Image (spheres, rainbow, N blue to C red):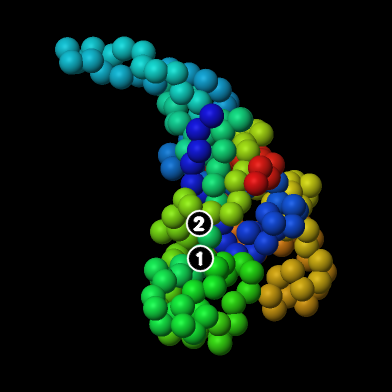
Amino acid sequence: MKERPILFSAPMVRALLAGTKTQTRRAMRVQPSDEAAVTVEHFHQTVVDRYGDEQPGPEVFGAWWDDGESGLVCPYGQPGDRLWVRENGWQRPERTPQMMREGADTWAPYYFDADGISEQEAADFKAWGFKRRPSIHMPRAASRISLEVTGVRVERLHQISDADCVAEGCPGGHGSIPGYQYNATPREHYRAVWAAVNGPGSWQANPWLWVVEFRRHA
């Protein structure tokens, strides 16, 4: 069993905490062709020895496609592995005598954006020297969510079903898409979230994705 970090936005962290998100989709670093038949399996990567000869390397888990030569290790592990969640937040500095005198040392070591931080709280954090921590810089010790990988597959973005959208934490409904006055479907909700995270044109690109299923471990 291996552990790896994974980044989530504040809305998706809230869905994880609520138990309504059990899947995540991430674009593959190397994209197979549109017509490729892709499977997820264990395979041996080819390595080149010191004499320049190709040899079978160690067994890995990932995607393999039908040209018989292309494979990609899954960066999110395999079933049974764990993912620890990185999220945006504020990290308390080391306690100082002034903090202890004024009671600020009783504050928690870490505060998370997903829990809702007011402007006044943010101002207080800055005044006390809290460090703003983007998710990419969140230390392992501060992570509060651990996920166990239960399944991995590869598919195109547009293959997502309504049930998958709900499992992604996107049930749709009124108010699910900012500025959208209608009752959004789960697919419309997920499409809006995908575009917000990945940028204009990212939905239309219909990339190949890692689809990672998981359950909350801690």
First in sequence: mark 2 vs mark 1: 1
101 relative to 208, above or below: below
Give me the residue at 57% from left, 27% from top.
40
User: In terms of image quadrants, where is residue 178?
Assistant: bottom right
Mark 2 in CB contact with mark 1 (< 8 angstroms): yes
- Amino acid beneath label 1: Pro
Disc number placed over residue 142 in the picture, else none: 2
Residue 76, percent from left and from top: 52, 39
Asked if residue 55 can be seen in this view, the reply is yes
208 and 2: which is toward the camera: 2
- Amino acid beneath label 2: Ala
**Helix, strand or loop for disc 1:** loop
Give me the residue at 46% from left, 83% from top.
101
Residue 169, percent from left and from top: 71, 56
Which residue, as the protein is rendered here, is positioned at the far left? 51
Q: For label 1, count other residues whose C-alpha is less than 10 Å away and answer few (under 14), some (14-19) or many (20+).
A: some
Image quadrant for the N terminus? top right
- The residue wearing badge 1 is 109
Residue 9, percent from left and from top: 57, 61
Q: For label 2, count other residues whose C-alpha is less than 10 Å away and answer few (under 14), some (14-19) or many (20+).
A: some
113 sits left or right of 137 in the view: right
